[in-house]
Amino acid sequence: MKELLRVLTHGLLPALAAVVVAWPLASHAQASDVDADALALLRKSTDYLAAAKRFSLVTDTTIEVVLADGQKLQFGHRVAITVQRPNKMRAQRVGELIAQTFTYDGHTLSVMLPQQDYYAQAAVPPTLEGMLDTARDKLNVIAPGADFVYPNAYERLTDGLTSAYVVGKAVVDGARCDQIAFRNAEVDWQVWIEEGAKPVPRKFIVTSKKMPQSPQFVSVMSDWQTAPQISANTFSFMPPKGAQRIDFLPMAQK
């Protein structure tokens, strides 16, 4: 820890300060600016994923939690996601707060908590978008990677935008990307989209504007496959012997 602090203090921080002086990003866009180039890059990425019959990826996600005294803590997890359009999805999450398997076979959503040996199931609509909406609105379950799984991801992501602009070029996990920044009334968010013929999102950050201390959600996406090998039982769920079936928690009344 002391060595890390020394490197930050004597190396990285002065370099970053020099970049900020030389490149005043804050003046790049006004609150009401929605740049057509930024929207075009996002559209290219979401259209690419919407057209993919199947794809898989791995996400490494960090979630910030703000304690009552204002201190921030970070928790991470890794998720392996496989999608087959129009109505199949599997996600396996392993992390510090929860381990979870999320399986959708076109008719039923199954969520397994292997560490607790519990699982829950519910009948859901026979489309990805219908399943994602039902999981969120009725079952209180947010599917991993849902923002980019929706076929109409572009319309959902751009709803209510007040600002959008291209920050510039960047490198994420060795891939050269376009970094794009967006704002709406609730959050600021950024996405890094890979250059070239495979314009997949490689990084995604959401910063809350309504919660104290502005916690962030950060997802780095890797190992993208647009023609993954999918076995016959990838989207099938069979509860382990001895696992206990439980109900999804009811949605809180507003």
Image (tube, rainbow, N blue to C red):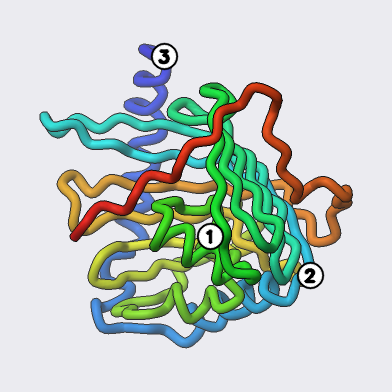
Question: Which callout, 3 or 2, points at the residue further toward the start of the chain?
Answer: 3
Task: Quarter of the image for the C terminus: give it.
Answer: bottom left
Kindly state the secondary structure of the residue where label 2 is placed. loop
Kindly state the secondary structure of the residue where label 1 is placed. helix
Q: In the image, residue 66 lies at what x, y percent?
A: 22, 36
Q: In the image, residue 170 lies at what x, y percent?
A: 56, 57
Q: Residue visible at 32% across and 80% down?
A: 160
Task: Quarter of the image for the N terminus: give it.
Answer: top left
Q: Which residue bears the numbered disc 1?
A: 146
Residue extending farthest to the left is 69
Q: Is residue 14 visible?
A: yes
Q: Which residue bears the numbered disc 2?
A: 53
Q: Residues within 10 Å of mark 3 (few under 14, many from 20)?
A: few
* Quarter occupied by residue 43: bottom right
Closer to us: mark 3 or mark 2? 2
Give the amino acid at mark 3. Answer: Glu
Name the foreground residue: 224 vs 231: 231
